[in-house]
Amino acid sequence: MDINCRTFAKKLEDYLQDGLDFSGRFAVVRHARQCIACSKQLADALRLRQMAKDLQRVKAPANFESALVARIANSRTRPEIPLFGRFWMYGRERSLLRNLLLASAGVVIIAIVASYWYLRSSPHAEAVSNMEVAEFEELNSRTTQKLDFHLKLPQAPGTETENELSSFEPELLRPGMESAETDYVEHVFPGPNNLPLTVRLPRTIHVQLGQASEEYFIRNVSH
């Protein structure tokens, strides 16, 4: 019986397991002698089968099963380690993750400190402070102008009362203030941020009693 290479490949496994009859085994051997490729394939298969036969079966030690059971029981009786402790003990296996967390925390802290230092020492902060001082001085000037007035009330003809504000003594007068008599008195009080706040008060308060004149009504009430 003649066979080709395809049939040889199909019958090779049966040949190695002694599953062929005499005619089949003879056909496989004769084809291997005639075909170089199939001959090499048969030689490799026979060598691999011989190597497998030479292998010795590995047997476990006599006390392997009892030692394994005892080790499992011992591991169950150990106290459970907290999550943080396990992370710290086995951190070498996760060193990359721990290093990333530490580096991220360091970057955040450095960014916060740098931002605070920049805001404290930047020219923008000084400009804002100067702007606040200028706004306060402008507000102080407007307040001084608004308080520079005479309090005039309706006055009946022939009746006039005068009270001098002698009890209000200024704590601090402006430098270079003239000693000439004026209609108002300047008082300096401590304002916000211990800045001086100047207030002008009239020296004389005029009070009118009785019915208001027609001129006062036209000038003040009709508008």
Image: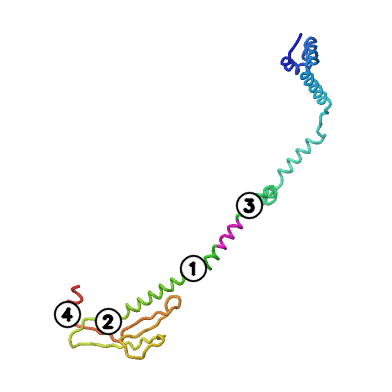
Give the quadrant of residue 169.
bottom left
Question: Along the polypeptide, which appears first: circle 4 or circle 3?
Answer: 3
Kind of residue sitting beneath label 4:
Glu
Question: Along the polypeptide, which appears first: circle 1 or circle 2?
Answer: 1
Image quadrant containing the C terminus: bottom left
Residue indicated by mark 1: 125
Question: Along the polypeptide, which appears first: circle 1 or circle 4?
Answer: 1
Residue indicated by mark 4: 215
Q: Tell me which residue sits at (37%, 77%) in the image.
A: 141
- SS at badge 3: helix
- How many angstroms separate mark 1 from mark 4 (CA)? 56 Å
**Label 4 crowd bin: few (<14), some (14–19), many (20+), radius 10 Å:** few
Question: Along the polypeptide, which appears first: circle 3 or circle 2?
Answer: 3
Residue indicated by mark 2: 151
User: Could you say which disc has been placed on residue 100 in the image?
Assistant: 3
User: Is 168 left, or right, of 21 in this rendering?
Assistant: left
The region drawn magenta spans 105-114
User: Is 183 left, or right, of 71 in this rendering?
Assistant: left
Q: Tell me which residue sits at (68%, 52%) in the image.
A: 88
Kind of residue sitting beneath label 3:
Leu
